[in-house]
Amino acid sequence: MPKNVCDEPVFSDLYQSWSQAIYRFLRFKGAVNQQAEDITQEAFLRLWKNCHTIEPQQVKGFLYRVATNLFLDQVKHQKVVLSFKEKKTKVSRPVTPEEELREQEFRTNFLQALAQLPENQRVVFLMSRTEQLTYREIAERLDLSQKAVEKRMSKALQTLREKLRSFDN
């Protein structure tokens, strides 16, 4: 007889089996301790809310997909917050339409170039630039050597420079 995900003992067993793996997965992606715990809890909450539609063999994929999406949503939100803070703190001066257009083009090309980076380079770049972490802090969070973080960052910066070379004035 197949197990039902909505049965509390089955759900409890699933939580015991997968919660640490999901947490470690999120930490590898770059989530900080509390953030990884919160996302793990939210993933299991969503599993519980959708337990009638999920078969036991789909649980692993569901949890990883939900955890990844929640983490990416938080990263996007952090980018928006940082962007807003930058706009708020800038000293305003009249901007010409040409400058606005060039800035918009640069931003679009930058986001495209960033999306094309290999995930390991993109994660290191974003942790450094958006969270303003040191290479040592990034290395600790990703369980890497500091040299590996430096190399990934160097490659990311080199790639971004090459792709955005046309914006050098």
Image (cartoon, rainbow, N blue to C red):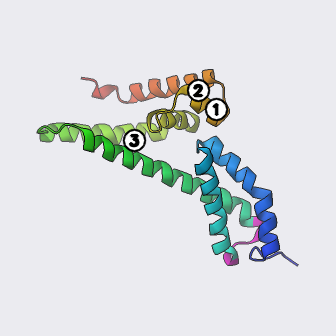
Identified by mark 1, the residue type is Glu
Residue 118, picture quadrant = top right
Q: Is residue 169 left or right of residue 108?
A: left
Q: Is residue 58 left or right of residue 94?
A: right
CA–CA distance between discs 1 and 3?
27 Å
Q: Is residue 135 left or right of residue 84?
A: right
CA–CA distance between discs 3 and 2?
26 Å
* Horizontal and vertical percent position of residue 70: 55, 56
**Residue contact between numbered discs 3 and 2, judged by CB atoms under 8 Å:** no
**117 lies above or below 25:** above
Identified by mark 2, the residue type is Arg
Q: Which of labels 1 and 3 is toward the front?
A: 1
Q: Which SS does the magenta portion mostly show?
A: helix
Residue lying farthest to the right in this orientation: 1
Residue 140: numbered disc = 1
Residue located beneath label 2 in the image? 136
* Horizontal and vertical percent position of residue 4: 79, 76
- Which span of residues is magenta-colored? 52-57
Residue located beneath label 3 in the image? 111
Residue 130, picture quadrant = top left
- Residue drawn at 61 percent across, 43 percent down: 29
Element at label 1: helix
Q: Is residue 105 located in the magenta-colored stretch of the structure? A: no
**Residue contact between numbered discs 1 and 2, judged by CB atoms under 8 Å:** yes
Which quadrant: the C terminus?
top left
Element at label 2: helix
Q: Residues within 10 Å of mark 1 (few under 14, many from 20)?
A: some
**Residue 101 visible:** yes
Q: Residues within 10 Å of mark 2 (few under 14, many from 20)?
A: some
